[in-house]
Amino acid sequence: MGVAGFDEEFDVVVVGSGAAGSAAALAARQAGASVLVVEKCDEATAGGNTRVSGSGWWVNRDPERARTFLRSLNGPFPVADDVVEAWATETAEISSWLKELGADVAMSGEYHTEPEYLELEGSDCYAGMDTVEGRMGNGLLHGFLLRALAERGIGTRFGTPAVELIVDEGTVVGVEVEGPGGRRRIGARGGVVLATGGFAADPQMVRDYLRVEDYVLWGSPASTGDGHRMAQAVGADLWHMDNMMTITGVRGDDEFGHYLALWNANNYLWVSGDGRRFVDEAAEPKHGHINRGGDYELFPLRPFHLIFDEQMRTAGPLSPTPDVLPVGWNLLMNGTRWSLDNSEEIAKGWIARADSIAELAGIIGVDAQTLERTVEQYNAACAAGRDDHFGRAAETLGAVSQAPFYVLQVAPLLGWSNGGPRRDGRARVLDTRGDVIDGLYAAGEISSTYSWCKDGGFHIGDALAFGRVAGRDAAACA
C-alpha cells in the first residue's frame, strides 16, 4: 500500500475516549500494538456519554442464555448471528478483564439488581450490574479508564477531532485530524477504531432518523454523529438508525434536561395537547421503551404535560438529587441541582401554579371542561382503586385533589442513539454490499448492538465488549 504523507504512524488509532475507545486502546496495547487515542473534546469534557452515565455494565452469568435474551430483546429486528455470538461471549468477560486492569469492581446493590425484561426468554442470564467501587455514576468508570490508559503509556490527544478517514485501494489506513498545530495525517497499520459516540446532539440527525423534534439532552453535547459521517463517506452501511433511548425530562435553561423521576408520591397524571390522559403514567420505563397494548414502544417521543397537586409538590424533588442518582450532563458537568421542595423551579417558571384545574387549563391552553373532566375521571379511578382506561396499577393511583395545583411540560430526555455503521462480530464495519471495509472498526454508541429493547447496563457492556473486540482485531492486522 504505502500512502505517502503520513505525519506519524501507529498500529492502531482509536477515535474517541469513552468506554468503547478506551477498551479498544487497552485491548490493542495488551496485544502488543502501538496505540494512539484522539479525542475531539478537551480533557475536562471528554469521555462522551460514558462520563455522565450510570457507569455500570450488566453481569452475564450464562452466555448461552444471553444469546437467547438478546434475540428476545431485538424481537422483530434481528442482528447477525456472529454479532449475537460475540456479544454473548464478550460481555461475560468484562468484569474479570477490568479487575485484571486494576479496577475495584463490585456489584451495585441499589440499581439494576434484576432484569427489566423478566418476562422475556433468556432473562435469567442477567445477574445484576457491576460498577467501579459498587457505586453508580459520578464518572467513576471514565476516571478509571483514563488512569488505565495513562499507566500503560497510551497517548490520548485531547482537543484533536478526527475529520476524515484516509483510504488506500479500499482499505482504511489512517485518519486525518485537526489539532492545535493544524491538520495532521496519522497512519494506522492495523486499523482505525471509531468510538465517537452517537448523534443525540445533532438536531438534524435526530429529526431525520429518530423523528423527534422537541427534546433535551441527558448526555454529552459532543455526540454529534462525527463518526457516522466519516464511515458513510467511505461506503459504510447503516443499521437500526431509528432506535434510541428517551425518558421523561424537563427542559431547563439550555439544551440540557433534567430527569423527571416521579418516585416520591403518586399524586399526578399526564395529559396530551388535548387535555386528556393517553397512557399508563406509572408503567415501568425500560430504557426507552414501555409496554403498551402487549408490545414495546419507544417512549416518550413528544412533549406532554404533568399535572400534580400540593401533596406531590411537598413529597420531594421531581428530579433526583446527585446523592440519589449521580447521572447526566446537567448534574455532573454543569453542577445543576433541583430544589428539594420544587420551589425554585416554580420561581423560575418551569412549573406553573394555579388554584384550580380550570386555571391550569388556561395556562397550558386546553379546554377547561375537558381537563376538569380528565382529572375527575382520574380521581374517580383512584377512589375505586381501578384504572379501566389505561390499567395503571392500583398501588400507584394517587388522587390529584389538594390545591394548589401544578403543571409542567415534560420533554423527551434523549440519553443516546443506537444506530450507526453496520458491523460484524469482529467489530469490522461493513459496506452497503455487506462486505468488510478493511481497516475500519466501530464500537460503542456509534454502532450499538441493540436494534430494539435493551436492559440496564447494556450500553456500557456493549461498548466495553466490542471495544475489546475491535482493539484486538486491529492489533492482529498490524
Image (spheres, helix red, strand yellow):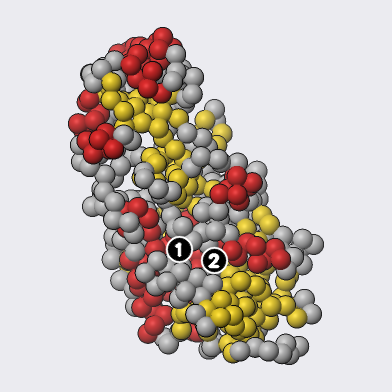
Q: In which quadrant is the C terminus drawn?
A: bottom right
- The numbered disc on residue 158 is none
Precedes in sequence: disc 2 or disc 1: 1
Query: Which residue carries the number 1 mark?
Result: 48
- Residue 252 position within the rendered picture, expressed as x and y whole percent measured from the top left: 36, 43
**Other residues around mark 2 within 10 Å, as few (<14) / some (14–19) / many (≥20):** many
Q: Is residue 3 left or right of residue 379?
A: right
The answer to the question of whether label 2 and label 1 lie on touching residues, with beta carbons closer than 8 A, is yes
Residue in view at x 64 percent, y 46 percent: 208
186, above or below 129, in the image: below
- Residue 112 position within the rendered picture, expressed as x and y whole percent measured from the top left: 37, 50
- The amino acid beneath tag 2 is Thr
Q: Label 1, secondary structure: give it.
A: helix
- The amino acid beneath tag 1 is Gly
436, above or below 356, in the image: below
How many marks do you count on the picture?
Answer: 2
Q: Distance between the residues labelled 2 and 1?
A: 8 Å
**Residue 80, can we see it?**
yes
Q: Is residue 327 left or right of residue 419?
A: left
Residue 266 figure quarter: top left
**Residue 391, can we see it?**
no
Residue in view at x 52 percent, y 30 percent: 292
- Residue 88 position within the rendered picture, expressed as x and y whole percent measured from the top left: 54, 61
Query: Which residue carries the number 2 mark?
Result: 196
Residue in view at x 76 percent, y 88 percent: 1
